[in-house]
Amino acid sequence: MCVCGEADGREQAREMAAECAPDIAVIDLGLRDSSGLELVKDLQQADAATPILVLSTHDEVIYAERALNAGARGYLCKSEPSAEVMRAIRKVLAGEVYVNQRMAGELIQRLAAVGALGKASIAEALVGRELEVFQLIGEGKNTRDIARELRVSESTVATVRTRVKEKVGAKDLPELYHLATAWMNSEQDAA
């Protein structure tokens, strides 16, 4: 692994990410001029295919879920040993989500308490591009149509679609398409 760039502010990080096209972005929540959560959102909107790992001193119980909802694929405290940091980077690069065991248990308890996703909680669970892709799937559009409409690559749509599938709890693509269609129908009925 090699570092292709470093930045201490939001704008500089956005420019560097666009210029360097990193395989992964490792972001601290405490930036010089902004919140790292805003940078996570910016990078997700610019290129959802770049996985993001948040490495921070902020309390994971408070910030891990927020970072994941903003589009990060993992959250790790800076106090973790370097071997754990490398493990987290590798998991995120492999397309998996990383949180430590304690935080995973906390997130599972929260999900169990909430139960099945309803109309309002789908809108809350999905951020930015994810909600756009979900809505377009619900309108019956395929990957190529969605990519064209959002002016992104088909691989970006596929990456976002995978994240959406995980967040709404769909076991496969047909179930995702069914959920999206049902959700859009309920939105139209409510209007």
Image (tube, rainbow, N blue to C red):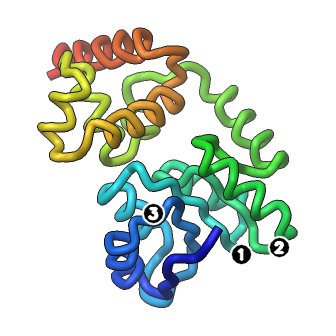
Decide which of tag 3 and tag 1 comes sooner along the chain: 3
Query: Between marks 3 and 2, how big is the CA–CA gap?
Result: 21 Å
Quadrant in which the C terminus appears:
top left
Q: What residue type is labelled 2?
A: Ser
Q: What residue type is labelled 3?
A: Val
What residue is pinned by disc 2?
79
Query: Between marks 2 and 1, how big is the CA–CA gap?
Result: 7 Å
Instruction: Tell me the SS state at disc 1.
Output: loop
In the depicted view, which residue is nearer to us: 73 or 23?
23
Q: State the image quarter where residue 188 is shown.
A: top left
The answer to whether the residues at label 3 and label 1 have Cβ atoms under 8 Å apart is: no
Decide which of tag 2 and tag 1 comes sooner along the chain: 1
What residue is pinned by disc 3?
40
Which label was assigned to residue 69?
A: none
Q: Where is residue 58 in the image (x, y as percent from the top left)?
A: 68, 72
Left or right: 115 as drawn, with respect to 37: right
Residue pictured at 49% horizontal, 23% vertical: 117
